[in-house]
Image (cartoon, helix red, strand yellow):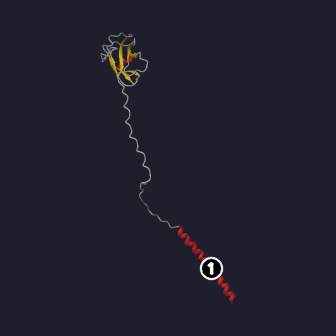
């Protein structure tokens, strides 16, 4: 009987180990599924031993914008401002020329450009060509340049009692 009791104890002991292993397994499984979230906050102080960062330099103001200014005169001495151009009577197929003087009153070199606008009558632009003899060389500050404007009229231009337009001189 002792043999049976021992044998029964071994079976009971094996069954208890199996239950204990299952219990441990369940217990471990429960721990792995637990999650906690903790909020956190704080203050960071400047260290008494840390060197101060260098002061940022005060930005210097931007340089002034370059000044571009041109004036147009009737004479090389720049004593009489050119306010208009009178082309006079021009025959169809002919031309008329006028010399003007352009002064750079700005503080940077400029290149001159030519345009026209506000033609009256509007079809007069179709029969005329405005040209000049400036070839795009720089005009220095204070420099004066004589420029000849020429208005060519197409031979097929119909007679016009009068015409007008604005000559636009650009310094850039």
Residue shown at 59%/74% (left/top)? 22
Q: Nearer the viewer, residue 71 or 92?
A: 71
Residue 40, by quadrant, is bottom left
Residue at the outermost right position: 3
Q: Is residue 16 left or right of residue 151?
A: right
Residue 92's x, y, as percent?
37, 10
Give the percent coordinates (x, y) of residue 42.
42, 59
The quarter holding residue 113 reads top left
Quadrant for the C terminus, please: top left
Side (left or right) of 113 relative to 11: left
* Residue ID for mark 1: 15
Front residue of this view, candidates 26 and 57? 57
- In the image, 51 versus 148, the foreground residue is 51
Residue at image coords 62%, 78% = 17
Question: For mark 1, does the 10 Å Cα neighbourhood hold few (<14), some (14 to 19), or many (20 or more) residues?
Answer: few
Single out the residue that lies furthest toward the front.
49
């Amino acid at each position: 009987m002792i043999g049976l009791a021992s044998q029964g104890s071994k079976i009971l002991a094996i069954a208890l180990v199996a239950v204990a292993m299952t219990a441990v397994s369940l217990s471990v499984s429960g721990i792995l599924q637990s999650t906690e979230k903790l909020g956190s906050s704080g203050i960071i102080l400047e260290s008494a031993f840390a060197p101060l960062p260098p002061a940022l330099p005060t930005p210097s103001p931007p340089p002034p914008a370059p000044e571009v200014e041109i004036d147009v005169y009737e004479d090389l001495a720049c004593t009489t401002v050119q306010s208009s151009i009178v082309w006079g009577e021009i025959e169809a197929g002919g031309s008329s020329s006028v010399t003007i003087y352009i002064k750079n009153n700005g503080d940077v070199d400029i290149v001159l450009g030519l345009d026209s606008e506000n033609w009256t009558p509007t079809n007069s632009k179709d029969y005329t060509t405005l040209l000049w003899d400036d070839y795009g060389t720089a005009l220095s500050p204070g420099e004066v340049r004589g420029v000849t404007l020429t208005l060519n009229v197409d031979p097929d231009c119909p007679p016009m009692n009068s015409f007008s337009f604005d000559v636009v001189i650009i310094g850039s």
